[in-house]
Image (cartoon, coloured by chain):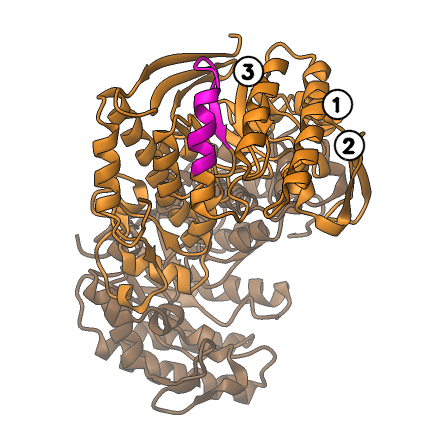
Chain colours: A orange, B brown
Amino acid sequence: MEYGFQFVKKDPSCAARLGTIRTAHGDVDTPAFMPVGTQGTIKALLPEEARALGAQMILSNTYHLYLRPGHELIRSLGGLHKFMNWPGPILTDSGGFQIFSLGALMKIKEDGVSFRSHIDGARHFISPETAVEIQEALGSDIMMCLDECTPYPATLKEARESLALTLRWAKRSRDAKTSDRQALFGILQGGIYDSLREEAAYEMQAIGFDGYALGGLSVGEPKECMMNIVEGITPLLPENRPRYLMGAGTPEDIVDSVMCGIDLFDCVIPTRSARNGLLFTNQENIVIKNARYRTDRAPVDETCDCYCCRHYSRAYLRHLFMAREILAMILNTIHNVRYYMRLMEDIRSAVRDGRFLDFRQHFFNIRPSKTGD
Amino acid sequence: MEYGFQFVKKDPSCAARLGTIRTAHGDVDTPAFMPVGTQGTIKALLPEEARALGAQMILSNTYHLYLRPGHELIRSLGGLHKFMNWPGPILTDSGGFQIFSLGALMKIKEDGVSFRSHIDGARHFISPETAVEIQEALGSDIMMCLDECTPYPATLKEARESLALTLRWAKRSRDAKTSDRQALFGILQGGIYDSLREEAAYEMQAIGFDGYALGGLSVGEPKECMMNIVEGITPLLPENRPRYLMGAGTPEDIVDSVMCGIDLFDCVIPTRSARNGLLFTNQENIVIKNARYRTDRAPVDETCDCYCCRHYSRAYLRHLFMAREILAMILNTIHNVRYYMRLMEDIRSAVRDGRFLDFRQHFFNIRPSKTGD
């Protein structure tokens, strides 16, 4: 099966939309959230558990897999799907975001970016071409172009130069692609500047990609900035290509971004929060180490259908967390990933029925501590 | 269902025997190995996974649960089975072994033992009576008497005095028991002295227990000492009660002890080794971080039927371990627990067919690096 995106319908009262991404490893119903499997595993989950929780596509990090165990090893063992026992769709990032997070340990040139490994300090160099080559070795279903993640804050001049580099790299990335079975998405940068973001939207479409991502958001800018960009740019993107908001976000971010027409999300929040003992519910979030849960025989969320909520009390989860048991991380992750997957199911159902704005209003009404409006 | 032990048959050529322990939470086929769930969870396993791997009864530690989250809390939440979502049989130790391991932080008197918590340094006191009371609150199917774990080495005089205290405490434990649904096992001490061990066997039977355990072994004495005691004492124990070798052991220890008529084992070796990257196989054990496994596409053990061996390569497991991923601990634990459960299944099958000595010979032949003979 070739890659493709099928636009299904738009909610009549906002930009929220329903679609299906088709890949060689199966379909993904959008709007979709991808749990993050940085090093070839979603932390604390078996792949079968992730699938049972509702995950259709996962994200894996090129930077980490390139350094360890190495993309050539993964290729020789049959590719990332087989290596990690995940038969479903995989999206890989380009590695750029992680490399740019190295700060003083990396240096950007026209050709590409040189950096030192966070593991052993060894020198490496990745260009737009090698980023595609690595992702082709991994065999992911959707690859991302190497881009320069424009930091926040950045001056207009800095953001303009950064975008120009990202556009040149995007062209080189598209030209470097050799695999027909793998899709390639372009990434729109431009900081918080509307004019640059618009330029990015047009120039990226001129190059032509299988999908378009918004990058350089959720990097410290105020939430209003992010939502302004999302709201302003999605109308400039083609209806027949998926739109991916990279690295977002909170449940509130997701609901608001879907309203603007975003189809795809990834974020470490559900999995990382789980390991830190923060549990999502339809009402307020739970900090499980809080003493008030010591004797609490209720599940995390009475309305949740996950394995954790069906079998365990808050008191037990608190005990596991205080005792630093591995099962705490497992059960918390199961719950939070299921929370996110249920959120996406509810979102898709609302769009399907043309009642997304009502859904969104209700969502914010029952999470009073958050001000997404 | 009341507690009971059904002796099924003895291998004609040695003391190995087959039986069934009946409890209010189900049956346990013996010889049996209990995975250890110290703090109300088998580290890195869901209860359903442990059951699917073949575990019938698990062990939980009274000392840890008494300190955190507290036995009264567990009682108020419906008991340990419900708390930890393990519907099968549970054996709890008395807490004695952990308390005596505190060394300078504990003090033994005729009444009981006072100690400081390893968690917060708070003072506590446990007597034979309170050890039973705590285990009744937990609701385990098999409780253990508080005993003094005689250290190795100990002089004959020290071991004699220690045994005398353990015998007085055993009588008090039996008198303190109020629950009819929970069995109580006595623990035989006596160090490495045959005469004391024999005295322990007779005196404990005179008090009368639902099963008899050998304690104070696997505490540093040479393996030959342990096997001498096991071989010498089991003939003195009644046929119609289970015999439990506490804290043992390696696969080799288990095979040799079954030959002497032991029915029940517990040990942290399979689970702790898994977390440290040591994997058991029918041939030599695997240290998964070894560089030779970097590109190894074979499973841990070609002959193993576990989830880990059916889906993952040594190369992937090595990657997870080097990257310190939680999934490394999960998959390694699944494999090692399954190895132990298969070992027990093979042992029971061999005893059933009256070919245990052949089984044992074959077992040691294919594990050449170990000298169990």
- Name the element at disc 1: helix
Q: Which mark is residue A129?
A: 1
* Residue appearing at x 50%, y 38% in the figure: B355
Q: Which mark is residue B281?
A: none
Report the Cα–Cα distance between label 2 and label 1: 9 Å
Report the Cα–Cα distance between label 3 and label 1: 17 Å
Please tell me how crowded label 3 is: few (under 14), some (14-19), or many (20+) other residues with Cα within 10 Å. Answer: some
Q: From the viewer's perspective, tell me whether residue A172 is left or right of residue A5.
A: right
Which segment is the magenta one? A228-245
A45 vs A182, nearest the viewer: A182
Dot 2 and dot 1 residues touching (CB under 8 Å): yes
Residue B355 to residue B16: above or below? above
Dot 3 and dot 1 residues touching (CB under 8 Å): no
- Name the element at disc 3: loop
Residue B292 screen position, x and y as percent: 76, 38
Residue A65 in sight in this render: no
* Residue appearing at x 52%, y 33% in the figure: A194
